[in-house]
Amino acid sequence: MRERPRLYVLIAAQFVVMLDTAVLNVALPTISRELAMDPVATAWLLNAYFLVFGGCLLVAGRAADVFGRRRMFLLGAALMVAGAVIGFTGSTDATLIVARLVQAAGAAALSPAAMSMILESTNGQARARAMSAWGAASTVGGATGVTVGGMATAALGWPAIFGLTGGAAALVLGCGFWLLPAGAPGVRRQFDGPGATLVTAAAFAIAFAVLSVPQQGWLSAPALAAALGSVILTGLLVIRERQAPDPLFPGTVMARSGVMMTLVVNLLGGAARIASFVLVAFLLQRVLRMDPGPAGMAMLPTSLIGFAVSVAVLPKLLARFGPERVVSAGCALLTIAHLIFAAATPSSSYAVQVLPGRALAAAGVALSFTPTTLVLAREVSQRDAGVGSGLASASAQLGGMFGIAVFGAVDAAAVFAAAAGILMTVSLLWGRRTHSDDRGQRGTSSDNRVRQEVPR
């Protein structure tokens, strides 16, 4: 009786996460002006969220596997509510940065917990439909965040965006507490504390290095120091993972050949997807000189397009062509969209150039995000669905940080999208070849056994 409402709650959680991720983009210039924030503080009001969100996803995914997915779901939603309250009542840039840090930690706990519960409870076409709805929630949540964020800022002032996200998170928290089952107790598992510390520190270092690039450059001391620290921490993590009795990344996950290729595709695709959201907000306000309200409304059509593609088109394409081909097609659309954005000038028409490009980007996001997650989920057991969800979200988020770091160079975002599509195509062809070789070897072995059994 409650299966469908439970699925709706899990999908709604992803909508809230993506809403919270994007809602500040259009409001940021207004907040910066009213609070007299300097450029560094303005940049880190945006970057603080991505730093904590990307840094905590992996460990939050494993924590969901070990401590319980419902528990992490409720904790994440509660943290998002708490962060919204801090932001709504705050009046300084430091308070707002703290609010975004708390919201990001909540989102990092909520998203992989919700995704892992979907992956755990579905398979086959039911999983494809559920994850298509998940993708629709992600697309609509991001676009709605930009749209509603601009409208709320123009009508009610920037604190309203925290009231909006806090109310949505509170609704998800209440529904989750009422509808989501606690789950049967399973085998008691250990949580690898040292490994969790290392992976979080390494993720923070990588994120800090990438996010430092726009303000200080690729060869700046902070970026280089953080990059070196991430290499050292990753090396220590590898050593620790080999010794841990229940590692964060089990061999059953990381040893599969398709996992690493899919993670790279997700990273590159995430860069192109996030760059498209940030870039369009930049184009509308800085290039076409739109105010926050009209800029938010200008994003509404793409929200509808992304929703329609995810719900009506994506499941049919997945059933007919498989997730790998759909990912390649989505990345091709993203590539074309970014090339259109690259040609935009102050005299460009929104209806003739920006809207068509954004429509292609919305379709590209819908066709690339969810199928990539499905490919990764296929390689991960239900026992490790949490860490699999964390890997999917973290790789996309890290890619998003790269997308933000280079979003001024639109051609780079197009290269990211094209490279992701090419790699997924190569992965599909390689998988077919490996599968064919395996069948050939099994056939040869069977023939040999038959020959041995035939009397001479």
Image (cartoon, rainbow, N blue to C red):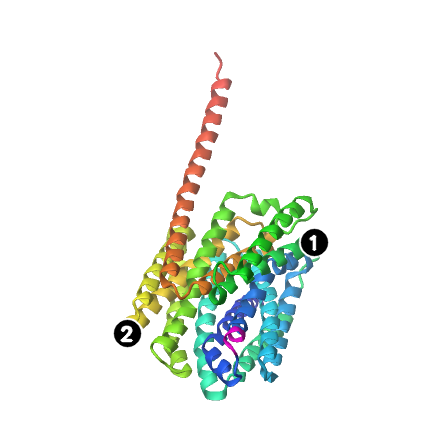
Circle 1 is placed at which residue position?
194
For the image, the number of numbered tags is 2
Image location (x, y in percent) of residue 1: 58, 67
The residue under the point 51% across, 48% down is 260
Q: Looking at the picture, which amino acid does disc 2 mark? A: Ser
Q: Looking at the picture, which amino acid does disc 1 mark? A: Pro
Taking the magenta stretch, the answer to whether it contains residue 41 is yes
Helix, strand or loop for disc 1: helix
The residue under the point 61% across, 79% down is 95
**Mark sitting on residue 100:** none
Circle 2 is placed at which residue position?
348
Residue 1 vs residue 89, the one in the foreground = 89
The residue under the point 31% across, 65% down is 340
Taking the magenta stretch, the answer to whether it contains residue 294 is no
Residue 297 vs residue 281, the one in the foreground = 281
Helix, strand or loop for disc 2: loop
Toward the bottom, the furthest residue is 156
Image location (x, y in percent) of residue 173: 61, 73
- At label 1, counting other C-alpha atoms closer than 10 Å, the crowd grade (few under 14, some 14-19, many 20 or more) is some
The residue under the point 50% across, 22% down is 449
In three-dimensional space, the C-alpha distance between marks 2 and 1, rounded to whole angstroms, equals 53 Å
Q: Earlier in the sequence, mark 2 or mark 1?
A: 1
Q: Which residues are magenta?
A: 38-42
* Secondary structure, magenta segment, majority class: helix
Q: Is residue 308 above or below residue 63?
A: below
Residue 179 vs residue 173, the one in the foreground = 173
Q: Quadrant of residue 96?
A: bottom right
Q: Is residue 200 above or below residue 434?
A: below
